[in-house]
Amino acid sequence: MKATAASKTAQYMALFRALEYVRPAYQRLFTDPYAFSFLSGGLKMATRLSGIPFVRNTIRGIIQRKIPGAYSSGLARTRYIDDLLESTVRQGVQQVIILGAGFDTRGVRLPFLQQLKVIEVDHPNTAREKMAVIARCLGKLPENITYYQLDFNVQTLDAFSFDFSIPTTIIWEGVTNYLDATAIDATFAFASRFAPGSFVIFTYVHKGVLNTPEQFFGAEKLLKDLEQIEERWTFGFEPEQLPAYLAKYHLQLKEDLGAADYRRQYMPERAEKGYEFYRVAMAANSILPFHT
């Protein structure tokens, strides 16, 4: 990420959610009335016009050519994580921590989080912009959300105060692929310190996309584009090695689906080719907390 700007990829995800909000309510995968406020002028205009079917199809085609599969993958991923999160709340989770929150609006748009403590942690550039937008939308910052500012590659979560004694769900979406192995290890060690009945929901990219991107449709162009905006991907997992890795931190893998799987689950009629290397996983801490 550039030192002077909020993440561009955070704005792209906000664009996808805003475009979904323009669709008729009965057709939406989710409802996010706040995403539009994070967009720049040109993207706001495109979103307004997307209510016209021809314009919407044109925008979708442009996104698909620029970032194959990202649009449908991003929408289905958002709904999938929403559903995973709600399932953990039904199981007794008492607080939610969103790491690398970006322009994520779950804390204000999901009714089942309104009475829970939510902590958002993100890079100062993105966090400041996000807080300003939310305050404008609501008239003030939500009382149930605490905002922490941190650069995961140079700081640790130990800089802040957390209640490890209560069941907690950590959401870590769109972050691991930008970090190094040390930061990844430290964050999973952090996640494992929470009480039994806690969960971590996270995304990751297949390690193969970093080593041999030509195996995945659209990946070579995507990685070059990320280099140009200084948001290079640096880390991935081999899916078959993930259970053993998580076990080192006393975490048990519960879910692990690739983009093709969750697109097929939530939007089979709108699925696109591409982004198959992107995955969503959920792990549970069902035993005594792990201490480093």
Image (cartoon, rainbow, N blue to C red):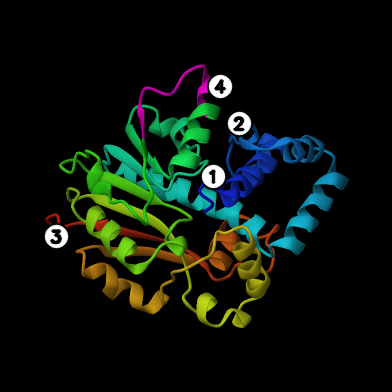
* Residue type at numbered disc 4: Arg
Determine the image quadrant of residue 27. top right
As displayed, is residue 241 above or below residue 159? below
Rendered location of residue 127, percent (x, y): 46, 38
What's the CA distance linking mark 2 and mark 4?
13 Å
Residue 280 shows up from this direction: no
- Per the rendered image, the range of residues in magenta is 134-147
Residue corresponding to mark 2? 33
Q: Is residue 62 left or right of residue 18?
A: right
- What residue does disc 3 label? 292
Residue behind mark 4? 136
Quarter location, residue 113: top left
Crowding around mark 4 (Cα neighbors within 10 Å: few <14, some 14 to 19, many 20+) is: few
Number of the label disc, if any, that sits on residue 66: none
Q: Which element type, helix, strand or loop, lies under badge 2?
A: loop
Q: Which mark lies nearer to you, 2 or 4?
A: 4
Does the CB distance between marks 1 and 4 fall below 8 Å? no
156 with respect to 129 (left or right): left
Decide: few, some or many residues near mark 3? Use Cα within 10 Å; few <14, some 14-19, many ≥20: few
At numbered mark 3, what does the secondary structure look like: helix, strand or loop? loop
Q: Position of residue 205 (x, y in %)?
A: 48, 68
| Earlier residue among tags 1 and 4 | 1
Q: Does residue 165 show up?
A: yes
**Mark 1 = which residue?**
4
